[in-house]
Amino acid sequence: MTSVIRTKHAECKDCYRCLRVCPVKAISFTTETQAMINDERCIMCGRCVVECPQNAKIVQNEVYKVKDFLYNKQKTVLSLAPSFPASFVEDGGQVIDALMSLGFTAVEETAIGAVFTTEAYKKILRENTEDKTYLSSCCPVVVNLIEKYYPDLKKNVLPVISPMVAHARYIKEKYGEETKVVFAGPCIAKLKEAEENGVDVAVTFKQLKDIMPPIEQKENKQSNKKYDLKTRMFPVHHGVTFAMRGQWGLDEDYWCVEGIRQCREVLEALRNNDIKPKFIELMACEGGCVGGPAVDSPYSLFRRKQKVMEYYHQSDQQVELEKPQASFSMTKKFTGQAVKEKEFSEEEIRKVLFKMGKITPGDERNCEGCGYKSCREKAIAVLSGLAVPEMCIPYMKARAESFANTIVKNTPNAILVVDKDLKVVDFNPSAERIFKHIPFKKGIALQDYINVDNYLAVLHGHQIISGVKIIYPEWGLVTREIITPLGKDDMVMAIITDLTQTEENLIHVQKMKEDVTVKAKEVIHRQMMVAQTIAGLLGETTAETKATLLELCKQLECEKL
């Protein structure tokens, strides 16, 4: 199975916002500081998707499958989550009509499936002889949370399938097993739950809208409901309890908790036997499903709740439910996917803290900049392979400052900073060494010692002077200087390279060249004189030899006669 949420690495800017909002810290970072969603730890609440400023979290999208079903004219029924009125500006009936025009065999509300879930809940609660606190099983995020982080409380979760799964089974029974069931809702976790429970395709409201035609604004015909569908209130606070009991409000036996933080507090209390209500309706999203990460609504949370309630009170949408009691299995099976946290010794934790610059407990700022609530929790994450020390912002800042200070302190170049009045703000040891005639200290006026025309030009013109050669004859000093403004601080920084020795070397090399040239000329001159002398001698000898040979030849010819 593929991940429902993944990170587009090219867009991940290493801001750790996703980790900060993740309630179970299911996001790990590699040495390249790329966010990676850890599927084994993830409860698919979708908070990271909503929070990411770069839109780097990608949600599984199988709309193409829906298009294929409709294009091939397969029998396809859309199950529309009861929070749908909160997602659309238009009237609920108009939305359903528009969806029908796409070619669905039918568009039904998942609230129908919720009826079966409600009946199953009521039956178990009526027969509860163990004096046990039962937890709702409608929210897949809560179920994931319990299975992974509170496995000892699985026994408290009502073993009943969710309304989505119940409705899918009802549709298959009503229209035929070959019928394709498409679910649309505000929940990212439903995409995985659908995949694991025989629902052919699940999409979010936003994904569904991408294939919807324009919705016609028209007056709906009024008709009486054939069934009082209280389960249309499932997506709001106390909605499940209202569907079961027909009344609103909190009492000592029926509770409703929303938001993962509060859900975890209740689960901890239940684990510790601090509370004992009869039933707790747990909803991972604040406000209920109308606050889901994929609700895609233009409205505030409170207006979304109101939209759902208004739709419930309308009388224009008929719901025909022939079998309030399910003839298919409503039993939910739980998995053994508990997250096993690794344990580390105090020595191992202290080593990581030491590496992050947390030498003493006082160094542990617990600023949460890295996404973890404490430095200690971050150290454990490092040991678990979920984080790297470089995620610690104070640590990286201190390291960067230390690195920068080391460079400034040890560079052979002078670094000098002056303010708008050309008074020295800061300098490094090399500045004192190169300009040893200046009694450096913070606050001295630089113009009292050197020409500051270039500094003034940079200060007033906000231009960089780069690579200018400046000679200080009174000190026998030759420099190359880069002078630059420091942002909006009205300060100027100069980086000065001492060229004195280089200039002396150049003069020495030039003198050597000149000396070599003179000597070369002398050698050449002497060589030319020698060559001329030798040539002269060779010329005289050659003439005498020629005369002698000619005389010899003449004598030989006379003898032949």
Image (tube, rainbow, N blue to C red):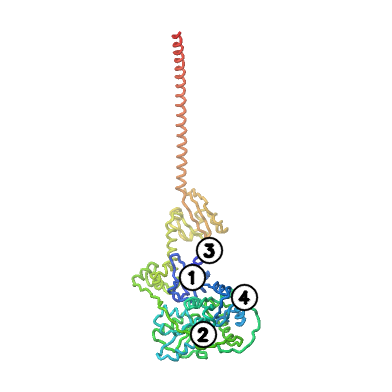
Q: For mark 4, what is the residue?
A: 213
Tell me the SS state at disc 2.
Answer: helix
- Residue 531 numbered tag: none
In the image, which is nearer the foreground, mark 2 or mark 1?
2
Residue drawn at (52%, 52%) of the image: 467
Give the CA separation, mark 4 to mark 3: 56 Å
Q: For mark 1, what is the residue?
A: 6
Q: Note whether 286 is above or below 28 in the view shown.
A: below
Amino acid type of the residue that numbered disc 4 sits on in the rendered structure: Pro
Amino acid type of the residue that numbered disc 2 sits on in the rendered structure: Ala
Give the CA separation, mark 4 to mark 2: 28 Å
First of labels 2, 1 by sequence position: 1
- In terms of image quadrants, where is residue 555? top left
First of labels 3, 2 by sequence position: 2
- Residue 489 numbered tag: 3
Instruction: Report if residue 185 is visible in the image.
Output: no
